[in-house]
Image: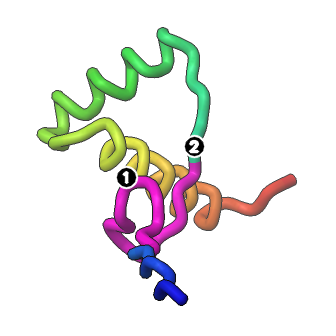
Amino acid sequence: MKKSISVNKKSRGRPATGHDPVSAVRLPEDLTGKIDAWATKNEVSSRSEAIRRLVELGLKTSEARPVP
């Protein structure tokens, strides 16, 4: 009786790069342009980083004032 061939089971796709979950968002072109302009003005290296910083700024602002 022949031995069965062992198969190396590799996971498919790109390997994980970090521990944070991905949050995909669709944005209109005009908003993407404004984000890119903000990133350039504030010397932010990537659109992802710019979006993270803008979200953090928005959250800080919303914490500073009570929501009606």
* Residue under label 1: 53
Please determine whether, in this image, residue 55 is positioned above or below residue 28. below
Task: Name the outermost residue toward the right.
Answer: 68
> Quick check: 56 left or right of 14?
right
Q: CA distance from mark 1 to mark 2?
A: 16 Å
Marks 1, 2: nearer the viewer? 2
* Image mark for residue 37: none
Residue 26 position in % (x across, y down): 60, 28
* Image mark for residue 24: 2
Residue 34 position in % (x across, y down): 39, 20
- Nearest the eye: 11 or 36: 11
Q: Identify the residue at horizontal 37%, vertical 55% (top origin).
A: 14
Magenta part of the chain: 9-23
The amino acid type of the residue labelled 1 equals Arg
Q: Judge the density around disc 1: few (<14), some (14-19), many (≥20) Cα neighbours within 10 Å.
A: some
Residue 18: say if magenta: yes
Q: Earlier in the sequence, mark 1 or mark 2?
A: 2
Q: Are marks 1 and 2 in contact (CB under 8 Å)?
A: no
Residue 66 position in % (x across, y down): 75, 62
The amino acid type of the residue labelled 2 equals Ala
Q: Identify the residue at horizontal 31%, vertical 49% (top origin).
A: 49
Q: What secondary structure is marked by label 1?
A: helix
